[in-house]
Image (spheres, helix red, strand yellow):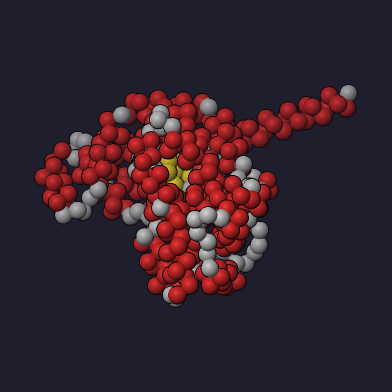
């Protein structure tokens, strides 16, 4: 009887958890709905009013994008030029003046023309949201301390660029998600990793001094993307069925060139103040740190295994000393950081890190 009672309690708790998860709408499609509402107005050659634009930018996905890297005006201009028939001449002028991104113009037009396909796919995702999130979560946690697991991050699907972002909520372009198909959990897992890892971060990027913000960004990006890329890049760049396979040759070249960047990073950190070194390194960091981080993380895993990497998942400063140990063990042409460069990184850790992992 006691055992039966315990089972019933477990089942009831599971049911409550499932209902709570469902109520949280962990998959958010409000941005897609708002995009198509705006698109339907623009395609009629009419201007949305302020309230209609406000509805778009108040959705979780567009809100976080315009709070971070895009502006409202950026989206408004691109949406108008892409979808309003009367803006054809203005669009050509904007292209000549390089005021718009032509690829995004085409992307927005394609999205507007695939409303039925997108809406059907959204319904498919809603019907299988629990399994989708569980698969992504499992892959993300394979490169994180067990204690970092928590409630699933919210995921907002919308139309912005053929890409995804690890903000809160996580943002993923709907056309990319559609093309990924069965590979979608890999892309989400990459962004899940950013979401959980950022909660473990030993410093607050918002506290960075202006003169040190660039170098801190570089240090953090290489570490963050390098680990998360172990989850998805081998398949997304190496599988011919992947929608990102067209980037594979470029990706391979950038990974092969990672040692050159490491040597330059070592030289600048050893000889320049943080402001100058950070500015140069940030401007020249390929793909926001992905290939360099992927290369360095691969050396660590090959030579030292995953355990220390995972234990230090929230400490980007420690990543470089860990890489040096692995690089010294690997030998050959594997580049290492000098004592001066590592000391520069350690000094930043002492200045900014408020907790350890």
Establish if 309 lies above or below 132.
Answer: below
The percent coordinates of residue 208 (x first, y second) are: 49, 69
Establish if 40 lies above or below 299.
Answer: above
The percent coordinates of residue 332 (x first, y second) are: 53, 54
Q: Residue 7 or 69: which is nearer the viewer?
A: 69
Q: Residue 146 or 46: which is nearer the viewer?
A: 146
On screen, residue 60 versus residue 37, left or right, reads right
Question: Can residue 166 be seen?
Answer: yes
Establish if 277 lies above or below 122.
Answer: below
Establish if 13 lies above or below 293.
Answer: above
Question: Can residue 148 be seen?
Answer: no
On screen, residue 124 versus residue 160, left or right, reads right
User: Looking at the image, how many numbered discs can be counted on the residues?
Assistant: 0
On screen, residue 266 versus residue 102, left or right, reads right
- Residue drawn at 40 percent across, 44 percent down: 252
**Residue at the outermost right position:** 1
- Within the image, what quadrant is residue 356 found in? bottom right
**Residue at the outermost left position:** 89
- Residue drawn at 38 percent across, 47 percent down: 253
On screen, residue 325 versus residue 107, left or right, reads right
Q: Quadrant of the N terminus?
A: top right
- Residue drawn at 52 percent across, 64 percent down: 337
The percent coordinates of residue 287 (x first, y second) are: 39, 51
Q: Quadrant of the C terminus?
A: bottom right
- Residue drawn at 19 percent across, 40 percent down: 84
- Within the image, what quadrant is residue 238 found in? top left
Q: Residue 204 or 1: which is nearer the viewer?
A: 204
The percent coordinates of residue 125 (x first, y second) are: 48, 29
């Amino acid at each position: 009887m006691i055992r039966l009672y315990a089972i019933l309690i477990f089942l009831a708790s599971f049911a409550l958890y499932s209902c709570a998860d469902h109520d949280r709408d962990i998959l958010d499609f409000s941005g897609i709905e708002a995009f198509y509402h705006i698109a339907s107005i623009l395609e009629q050659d009419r201007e949305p009013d302020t309230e209609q634009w406000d509805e778009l930018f108040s959705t979780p996905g567009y809100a976080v994008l315009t709070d971070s890297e895009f502006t409202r005006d950026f989206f408004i201009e691109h949406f108008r030029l892409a979808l309003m028939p009367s803006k054809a001449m203005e669009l050509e002028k904007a292209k000549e003046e390089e005021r718009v991104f032509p690829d995004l113009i085409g992307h927005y037009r394609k999205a507007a023309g695939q409303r039925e396909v997108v809406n059907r796919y959204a319904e498919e995702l809603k019907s299988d949201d629990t399994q989708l999130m569980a698969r992504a979560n499992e892959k993300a946690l394979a490169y994180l301390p067990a204690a970092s697991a928590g409630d699933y991050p919210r995921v907002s699907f919308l139309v912005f660029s053929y890409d995804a972002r690890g903000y809160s909520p996580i943002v993923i372009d709907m056309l990319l998600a559609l093309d990924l198909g069965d590979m979608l959990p890999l892309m989400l897992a990459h962004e899940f990793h950013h979401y959980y890892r950022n909660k473990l971060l030993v410093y607050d990027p918002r506290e960075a001094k202006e003169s040190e913000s660039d170098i801190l960004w570089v240090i953090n990006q290489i570490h963050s993307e390098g680990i998360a890329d172990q989850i998805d890049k081998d398949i997304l760049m190496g599988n011919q069925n992947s929608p990102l396979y067209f980037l594979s040759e470029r990706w391979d070249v950038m990974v092969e060139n990672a040692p050159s960047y490491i040597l330059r990073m070592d030289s600048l950190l050893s000889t320049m103040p943080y402001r100058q070194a950070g500015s140069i390194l940030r401007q020249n960091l390929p793909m926001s740190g992905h290939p360099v981080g992927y290369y360095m993380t691969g050396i660590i895993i090959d030579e030292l295994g995953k355990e220390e990497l995972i234990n230090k998942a929230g400490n980007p400063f420690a990543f470089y000393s860990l890489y040096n140990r692995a690089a010294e063990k690997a030998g050959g042409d594997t580049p290492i950081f000098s004592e001066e460069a590592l000391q520069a990184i350690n000094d930043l850790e002492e200045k900014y890190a408020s907790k350890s992992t």
